[in-house]
Image: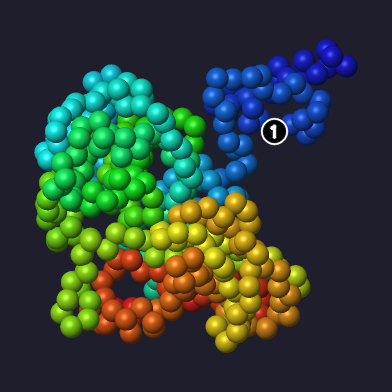
Amino acid sequence: MATAAVAILKTSFAKAVQTGVPVSFFKVDDPAKVPGTPPGEIGTRSHFEKLIKKPSDISSRSPLQDFHGIITPSDLHFERHHNGVPAIDPATYKLVIHGMVERPVVFTLADLKRFPGVSRIAFLECSGNFRSGKEELSPQDICGLTSQSEWTGVRLSTLFREVGVRPGASWFLAEGGDAALMTRSIPVTKGWDDAIIAYAQNGEALRPEQGYPVRLFLPGWEGNTNVKWLRRLELGDSPWQTREETSKYTEGIRDGKIRQFSFDMDARSIITFPAFPATVERGWIEIKGLAWSGRGKVRKVEISTNGGKTWAIAELQEPVLDKAHVRFRYLWHWNGTETVISSRVTDDTGYTQPTMQQLLAARGPEMGGYHLNPVTGWLLKPDGRVLHKPESWR
């Protein structure tokens, strides 16, 4: 038997080499009859799993509908860049903190790692995380610019104490080391609160796309303030009014006013199953999805299976963490009648996710494309097809 197994393995190996397919990917009728792939240096995802991000010129969207649990695999975390991903040598990396401080300091990566470390699980979301207009949109297409990781680094408050922030300092400028020199003005109060200078993600060094070797992480705040490839922090007494907080990441609202420095990401939820492009059968269906809030914890998620006429409480899957994605579930019996299903979340501040009509009523027809968090509807057709229910907002 052993000889036969070895012969089969040699044949499989020869065919794999000829076709250029890794040996572990070569299909055999009975895997129990052939020795498996030996231990390796780096683990791989099964080739049967086809999880990919959807890239554009400036971003890549996470496949929310394909995930389980609340942690996003690091290689599938969404990306948003302003001029590509820089290559930064950690051996020569430096972080400068200066301005309204008692002791300007240049920190190396090793210096940062000598400070007491902290870790927390929290989501990150782009403030432009919304798409609509077509029925053929998946959760990935609609709001795939959010992901969640365990972030590890040093508290910014620790570094503030090290450099001695002066009493009059109320803002700091965070500058990235990318070709866009991405810069944002951040209130010093956020730095003292829960900001992290992160150098690790999900147990390993940051991925280059996520800011390697060091990024600023501001739990619950819009993605562009979480400056990647961080190289400089300057303390001052007013915002710097950079391009990314004047001509970008601001928006018109009612009566000719402008929304600026709208940092917090509002509570949001989305059903990830059933959702386009899934097809379902009548009978019992477990409605599943994600909910989150940049202002605190998710308090409850409600499900409507009749186009918003009535709502029922969904089950929240533990753990329910502060400023973090939470899984929700709701068991529902579908009789095959055409209907619209949707979810809405309420956070522990009492804020409830609005409909698109409520957003327009609050912000007016001048409403821009940032911080849109409307209830998302999914249309179930009698034949089992699931389509996005698009809504006009411009």
Q: Is residue 202 above or below residue 264?
A: above
Q: Which residue is mark 1?
A: 27
**Residue placed furthest toward the top:** 3
Measured as percent of width and height from the top left, residue 356 is found at 40, 78
* In front of the other: 58 or 3: 58
In the image, 96: left or right of 280?
left
In the image, 364: left or right of 140?
left
The crowding category of the residue bearing disc 1, from other C-alpha atoms within 10 Å (few below 14, some 14 to 19, many at least 20), is few
Q: Name which residue type carries label 1.
A: Lys
* In front of the other: 278 or 210: 210
Q: Residue at x 70, y 80 (%)?
A: 336
Q: Residue at x 57, y 28 (%)?
A: 43
Measured as percent of width and height from the top left, residue 57 is found at 29, 50
Q: Residue at x 40, y 29 (%)?
A: 116
Quadrant of the frame with the N terminus: top right
Q: Is residue 270 visible?
A: no
Measured as percent of width and height from the top left, residue 247 is found at 14, 61
**Residue placed furthest toward the right:** 1
Q: How many marks?
A: 1
Q: Is residue 190 visible?
A: yes
User: Circle 1 sits in a helix, a strand or a loop, which is it?
Assistant: loop
Measured as percent of width and height from the top left, residue 380 is found at 61, 76
Q: Residue at x 59, y 58 (%)?
A: 327
Quadrant of the frame with the C terminus: bottom left
In the image, 278: left or right of 250?
right
